[in-house]
């Protein structure tokens, strides 16, 4: 900018001088630009390296255990078969409860509610709930589900706590999915004389299916990764037989198991076994999350293509 | 697919129009009611969290010994004359949160700037999924890595200045670095959204005036995205202050603040914060002490609530959304 | 399409319903053991099998015995599901009181002066546990500590092993959290005062196992733990006031650092809870008690038991 001003006020006799200083200015600006760009690139490189190194470290330490089939057994101390089952069980049970409720709430907000104080309040509540630390939700779950409702430390208590944790996240993802359905499609449905609920069932939900699936998969990632909300609500130990659908027993899962082995349960099994199990479980979790994050998008796209084709 | 279902619908209506509509209206009403209940459930849950934690937490003040909750840093519920000063825990959470955000903010903004303004496409294609994975990374995985990699590493470096060489790796330094890993992805992602929200016209105008790319970023894009970047910081802090297990695994402290707080060595010895205290002692506690941990949880809740309010306020002032 | 959606909705509704039915059904059986009836289906052993869900938890010192007994019980009785949370004695009592656990195990008697609300808990004594003071391998030449020396260490007066006859090495003091039954026993019978140690050389371990693993890995460490964890981690135990942590010394109460293990229930134990507690105490489980380093209550002299029993519980 200053360069342009300088040009406009240039004096004939100092033309060469000015051109020279202008060149110097440009050089300085370019140097600054290059230095700044270099620094930004370096920061990004270091940041990216940090995360890539973490992934490599976790996989490097864990994969030797993962390729051993004994690791997935359920007898002995160095196995995580039970924890994998518990993680899957918890995932499915919490999605069964979460998806209908969050989807219903999203349908209300997108299709029925008029813009007004109620919608603002609900959105504000969801945003606040999303910001509540999961440990605090764990305390809440212990207080309300485990003791006030007498559910005890059980899978069900854990699931209900996870519902509180994932509700706002799933709600927002589902809302986005529903809003993305074109207005013409809805109006087309309504114009044919169907009731609103009928229109939602036949038009909105099918066309927003890709977005809904993405939402489900992403909230699944949160369920798999969560531990802090569960240690006070689901417990950290297993009965002899965890391969049951009974929601009223206390179990752990992969993440709780890692925490348990490195804290309360330290010393109950030899340290090298504990480290092996933790490293293997950590690698397994990272792989699952990588697959989920990459998979959620491709699944969404795949379904979209199918829907369009049909 | 949509077309198919519309066909079905028309057949239905043709056969039994009047009954169909009445039944349709009724089911519409019922569905609407159910949806409404589900939507209001969010409000009920967050209300319940505040009420239940608040009531249980505030009950501790029925015990006269607990009056020093906000004024003392001595937490010693099992002493003959118990003391319930929580300032030490609160200080721990505040220090680690502030240190980590001070480290994360420049790195996060730098990465976001590079990725939105300069990076070749493949960099984004690689980094975006990686950041998304790390936004939801299990905190125990990072905590485990912290225990086996970070803590021994810090112990090696800091042993000469730490008061106890055996425990030099645990403490606020390790907790801060863990938090940096935990919140950096969040801050970068939100910052990227903020920078993307700045319309290209701002960039073009700046470039047209003859700015270099760095001047364009520094003088046009960053100021335009300031509110969004502010939200990124606040959201990062919300995550940092509530982070529990990863931090708890490397802190190593119990209930005591170190004696000398104003020396650098304070970072390199077992230390305390709010979440660590709850994770370690809540399940064992009874009576006033139990309510004390609910109160600590309530304090966390209020702090996160304030953060959310601040971020909403900042967002409401932003020009580009 | 319409049909598919209906089926999907019906299925989810059914799934949710079934979850809640199962939940309600077994919550009456699970969280109140009184309703689960003991089905006298004696199998190979003489266990009086009961069915249902049983949540036990608490003392990490008693943990190995409860876990082993639970494993054996579940192997013999197919309808029983037993979990064991290792969270500390204080957590056991609290869990039994607020209903999140059916059985809360504790190394101590309930103190009604400290927790008057725990008067609803019924005491079931199951075994005797021997604790010991343990030190790191690098603390050489220390085989005996007087209770006064231990007190000096745990109140921060003594900070180097050379002050108590050991090498010139800083003492790393390892404690347990205040709810721990091991810590309470230690404070009551060895220190005769609460621990006041704090600072950079002090850490609080999270469980009996965590104590053992810390003593094994830290230099110059001292800690207190059950004899079982000390043996399993092959750690060095020291005599206290000249008495070694042996069963003979406990029988006569010459060695003071031991206690009675309790499994508290809310009200009298019934159903699965009663059946399980009976099993833990029974002759069938004697080998398990021995394996995990516990003594039978009957093996200890009446005087010794009386010395550990507070007046209120007699």
Image: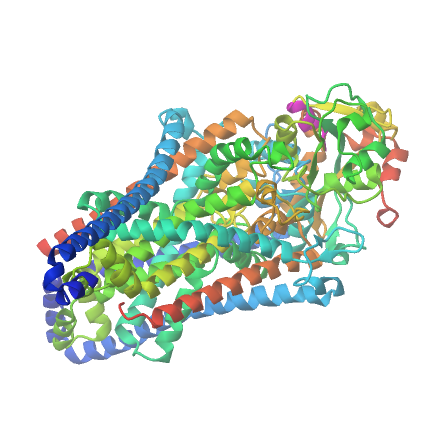
Percent across and percent down for residue B315 are 35, 68
Q: Which residues are magenta?
A: C225-233
Was residue C229 drawn as part of the magenta stretch in this picture? yes
The one nearer the camera, A98 or B111, is B111
Which residue, as the protein is rendered here, is positioned at the far right? Answer: C303
**Residue A241 seen:** no
The one nearer the camera, A162 or B210, is B210
| Residue at 55%, 27% in the rendered image | A271
Q: Is residue B150 left or right of residue A188?
A: right
Percent across and percent down for residue A110 are 27, 71
The one nearer the camera, C224 or A73, is C224
Percent across and percent down for residue C60 are 65, 38
| Residue at 60%, 48% in the rendered image | B272
* Predominant secondary structure, magenta span: helix
Q: Is residue A235 above or below residue C285?
A: below
Percent across and percent down for residue B14 are 10, 75
Was residue B40 drawn as part of the magenta stretch in this picture? no
């Amino acid at each position: 900018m200053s360069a342009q001003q300088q040009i406009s006020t240039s004096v004939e006799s100092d033309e060469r001088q000015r051109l020279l200083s202008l060149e110097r200015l440009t050089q300085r600006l370019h140097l600054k630009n290059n230095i700044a760009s270099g620094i930004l690139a370096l920061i990004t490189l270091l940041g990216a390296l940090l995360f890539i190194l973490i992934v490599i470290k976790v996989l490097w330490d864990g994969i030797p255990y993962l390729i051993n089939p004994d690791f997935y057994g359920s007898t002995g101390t160095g196995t995580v078969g039970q924890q994998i089952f518990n993680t899957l069980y918890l995932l499915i049970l919490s999605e069964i409860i979460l998806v209908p409720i969050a989807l219903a709430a999203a349908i209300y907000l997108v299709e029925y509610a008029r813009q007004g104080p109620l919608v603002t309040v609900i959105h504000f509540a969801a945003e606040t709930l999303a910001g509540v630390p999961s440990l605090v939700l764990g305390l809440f779950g212990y207080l309300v589900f485990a003791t006030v409702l007498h559910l005890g430390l059980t899978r069900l208590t854990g699931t209900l706590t996870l519902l509180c944790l994932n509700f706002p996240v799933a709600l927002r993802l589902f809302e986005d999915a529903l809003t993305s359905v074109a207005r013409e499609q809805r109006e087309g449905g309504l114009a044919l004389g169907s009731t609103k609920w009928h229109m939602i069932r036949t038009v909105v939900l099918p066309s927003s299916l890709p977005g809904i699936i993405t939402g489900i998969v992403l909230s699944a990632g949160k369920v798999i990764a969560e531990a802090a909300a569960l240690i006070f609500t689901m417990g950290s130990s297993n009965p002899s037989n965890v391969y049951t659908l009974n929601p009223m027993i206390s179990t752990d899962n992969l993440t709780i198991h890692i925490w348990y082995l490195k804290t309360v349960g330290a010393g109950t099994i030899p340290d090298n076994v504990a480290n092996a199990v933790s490293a293997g479980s950590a690698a397994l979790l990272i792989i699952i999350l990588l697959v989920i994050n990459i998979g959620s998008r491709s699944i969404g796209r795949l379904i979209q293509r199918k829907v369009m084709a049909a | 697919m949509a077309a198919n279902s519309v066909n079905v619908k028309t057949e239905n209506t043709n056969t039994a129009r009047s009954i169909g509509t009445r039944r349709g209206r009724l089911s519409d009403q019922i569905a609407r009611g159910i949806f409404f209940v589900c939507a209001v459930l969010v409000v009920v849950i967050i209300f319940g969290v505040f009420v239940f934690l608040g009531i249980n937490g505030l009950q501790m003040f029925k015990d006269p010994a607990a009056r020093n909750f906000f004024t003392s840093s001595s937490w010693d519920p099992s002493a003959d004359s118990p003391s319930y000063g929580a300032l030490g825990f609160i200080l721990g959470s505040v220090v680690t949160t502030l240190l980590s955000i001070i480290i994360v903010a420049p790195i996060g903004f730098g990465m976001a700037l590079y990725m939105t303004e300069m990076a070749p496409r493949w960099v984004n294609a690689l980094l975006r999924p990686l950041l998304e994975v790390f936004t939801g990374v299990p905190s125990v995985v990072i905590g485990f890595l912290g225990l086996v990699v970070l803590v021994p590493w810090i112990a090696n470096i800091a042993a000469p200045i730490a008061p106890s060489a055996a425990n030099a790796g645990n403490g606020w330094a390790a907790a801060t670095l863990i938090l940096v890993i935990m919140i950096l992805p969040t801050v970068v992602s939100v910052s990227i959204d903020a920078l993307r929200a700045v319309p290209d016209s701002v960039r073009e105008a700046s470039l047209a005036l003859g700015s270099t790319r760095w001047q364009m970023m520094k003088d046009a894009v960053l100021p335009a995205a300031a509110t969004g970047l502010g939200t990124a910081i606040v959201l990062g802090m919300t995550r940092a202050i509530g982070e529990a297990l990863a931090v708890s695994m490397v802190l190593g402290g119990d209930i005591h603040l170190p004696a000398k707080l104003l020396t650098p060595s304070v970072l390199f010895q077992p230390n305390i914060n709010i979440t660590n205290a709850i994770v370690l002692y809540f399940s064992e506690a009874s009576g006033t002490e139990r309510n004390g941990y609910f109160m600590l949880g309530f304090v966390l809740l209020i702090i996160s609530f304030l953060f959310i309010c601040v971020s909403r306020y900042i967002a409401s002032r932003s020009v580009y959304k | 399409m319409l049909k598919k959606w209906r089926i999907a909705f019906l299925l989810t509704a059914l799934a949710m319903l079934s979850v809640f039915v199962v939940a309600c059904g077994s919550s009456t059986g699970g969280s109140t053991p009184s309703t689960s009836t003991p089905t006298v289906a004696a199998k190979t052993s003489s266990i009086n099998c009961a069915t249902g869900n049983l949540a036990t938890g608490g003392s990490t010192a008693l943990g190995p015995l409860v876990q082993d007994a639970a494993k054996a019980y579940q192997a013999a009785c197919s309808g029983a599901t037993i979990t064991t949370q290792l969270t500390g004695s204080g957590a056991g009592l609290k869990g039994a009181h607020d209903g999140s656990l059916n059985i809360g195990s504790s190394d101590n008697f309930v103190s009604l002066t400290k927790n008057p609300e725990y008067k609803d808990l019924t005491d079931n004594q199951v075994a005797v546990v021997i604790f010991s003071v343990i030190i790191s391998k690098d603390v050489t030449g220390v085989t005996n500590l007087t209770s006064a020396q231990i007190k000096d260490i745990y109140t921060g007066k003594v900070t180097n092993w050379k002050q108590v006859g050991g090498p010139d090495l800083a003492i790393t003091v390892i404690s347990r959290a205040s709810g721990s039954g091991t810590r309470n026993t230690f404070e009551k019978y060895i220190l005769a005062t609460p621990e006041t140690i704090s600072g950079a050389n002090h850490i609080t371990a999270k469980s009996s196992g965590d104590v053992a693993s810390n003593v094994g890995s830290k230099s110059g460490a001292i800690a207190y733990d059950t004899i079982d964890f000390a043996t399993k981690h092959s750690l060095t135990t020291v005599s206290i006031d000249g008495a070694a942590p042996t069963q003979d010394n406990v029988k006569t109460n010459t060695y003071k650092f031991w206690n009675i293990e309790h499994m508290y229930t809310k009200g009298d134990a019934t159903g699965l809870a009663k059946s399980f507690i009976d099993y833990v105490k029974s002759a069938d489980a004697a080998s398990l008690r021995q394996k995990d380093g516990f003594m039978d209550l009957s093996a200890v002299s009446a005087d010794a038991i009386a010395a550990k029993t507070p007046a209120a519980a007699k």
